[in-house]
Amino acid sequence: MIIVIIGAQWGDEGKGKVVDLLADRFDIVSRYQGGHNAGHSVYVGDRAFVLRLLPSGIIHEDKTCVLGNGMVIDPKAFFEEIDQIAEQGVEVSPERLKVSSRAHLIMPYHRALDHTSEERLGNEKIGTTLRGIGPAYEDKAGRRGIRVADAMSPEILKLRIERNLEEANRIIVLYGTQPLRADEILAEMTPLVERLRPFVCETSHFLAEARKAKKKILLEGAQATLLDVDHGTYPYVTSSNPTAGGASVGAGIPPHHITGVLGIVRTYATRVGEGPFPTEMLDTEEPIAHLIRERGNEYGSVTKRPRRCGWFDAVATRYAAELNGFDSIALTKLDVLDELDEIKVCVGYTINGERVDTFPAVSHDLRQIEPIYETLPGWKSDTLGITEFDRLPVNAQRYVRFLSEHVGVEIGLISTGPERDQTIILKDSVMEGWFTN
C-alpha cells in the first residue's frame, strides 16, 4: 500500500498531524518535493515538533524516513533540525533516515539570490520564505544544480561552486550586496557534506525494494495544490509539484504503484504571503478573521507571519480533488469554528458578472472573483477532542456533509484538536480501510 498525502489549499492544512497519525500504520514515510520552507507541526503530549525538512513520521522511532530526489536540501538546515529534535528526545540515525543521492543542494548563494529576486520584483514579489528554495530549483531546471551525489566528490563540489558563483555574484553585486567567496562557501559546505555522507543512498531503489517486500509507504507532500508550479495561482506559487503526480516523480515510484491519495483541507482557508485569495476575509470581516487566527494559531510555523484567513472555498477544493484524484479527505480544525454564529462556504464564482464554476488559470482573473456564498448556521458548542461523528453537534455534522457534497469526495477523517487522539475516523470510509489494512 502506497498512500500520498496532499494539501488541497494553500498549505498549512494540518498535514503534519495527519501524517503523524497515519505513520503508525506504515513502514516508511517519504517527502518527495520542497525544502525547509515547509512547516509541519506535530503535537505529542506536551511536546511540540516543527518539522521543516524531515518527514513527520520521524517522530515514530520504528519508522524509516526518506528525503526523495524531488527535494532541495540545505545541509545546514538539515542538521540543525536533526540536532533540535534530538534535544527533544528523538534520535535520527542513517539507519532511520535516507537522503536521495539525486536530491539537489541549497547553497549559500541561493539564499542571497532569493533576497535579490524579491527585491527585483518589488510590488509583485512572490512572498517567499527567502531560504533559497526557488533559486535552487532554478539551477536544477537550468542543469547547473549541485546534487547530493555530486557533492560527495570534493573536486566536483569545488568546480561547481566556483562555476555557479561567477554568475550568481553578477546578480548579487548588481543589487548592492557584497559578492560571496567560493573558498568560504566550500569551507562551510565541506564538513556538512561529510556529515551528510552516511545518510545518502539511492532512495528510488530503496523504495522499490520496500515495495517488493510488501512494506507500506506513506508519501508526504509539502506546501499544497494551489501552490503547485504548474497548477497553482501562478506566479504566486512554490517551485515544485506538491500534487499527486509530483509524488511519483519526486520519490521515484511508478504511478501505477500508488494505491490511494488523501487530501488535507481545513474547515476554513488560509494563505501566507502574496497572491490571490478569492475567499479572504476583508476589512468588514476582520473580527472573524482575528478570532480564527487566534483560535487556530494561524501564524507560519517557519516564518511566524500571520496567515491571511478566509472562508472555505469549495470551487478551489474541488479543483484540487480533480487534479489529485482524492480518494478521501481529512478535514482539520473543526473546533476552531466552534464560536461562530454563521459560517460561509464559497460554492461558485462570478467574474465581471458571469458565473464561473472552475478555478481560473490567470492571477488577474482570480483577483476579480466575487465569491458566491452559502451561509450555514454555526453550532456554538465545544467540539474539541470529540472522537465520534455522531457526538458532534447536529450543525457541525451538516457542515461536514455540506463540504463533502460540494467537493465531491468523502470526508473520512475529522480533526477536532491538535493531539493524535483528537480525531474522528468515519465509519465505512476509505480512510477507515487505510487504518485497518
Image (cartoon, helix red, strand yellow):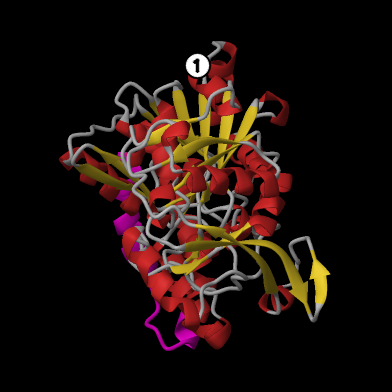
Position in image of residue 121 (x %, y %) = 56, 83
Q: Secondary structure at mark 1?
A: helix
Q: Residue at horizontal 23%, vertical 34%?
A: 90
Residue 122 to residue 254: above or below: below
Q: Amino acid at mark 1?
A: Thr
**Residue that extends furthest to the top in the rendered view of this protein:** 213
Q: Reply yes or no: does residue 155 show up in magenta.
A: no
Residue carrying label 1 = 436
Does 409 sit left or right of 4 as displayed? right
Position in image of residue 425 (x %, y %) = 48, 29
**Residue that extends furthest to the right in the rendered view of this protein:** 354
Q: Foreground: 144 or 226?
A: 226
Q: Foreground: 105 or 281?
A: 281
Does 99 sit left or right of 42 as displayed? right
Q: Foreground: 360 or 410?
A: 410
Q: Reply yes or no: does residue 193 show up in magenta.
A: yes
Residue 311 image-quadrant placement = bottom right
Does 384 sit left or right of 392 as displayed? left
Residue 368 to residue 424: above or below: below
Q: Report the magenta residues as a range.
A: 172-195
Where, quadrant-wise, is the N terminus in this rendering? top right
Residue 173 image-quadrant placement = bottom left
Q: Residue at horizontal 23%, vertical 42%?
A: 85
Q: Residue at horizontal 39%, vertical 64%?
A: 292
Is disc 1 surrounded by few (<14), some (14 to 19) or many (20+) residues within 10 Å? few
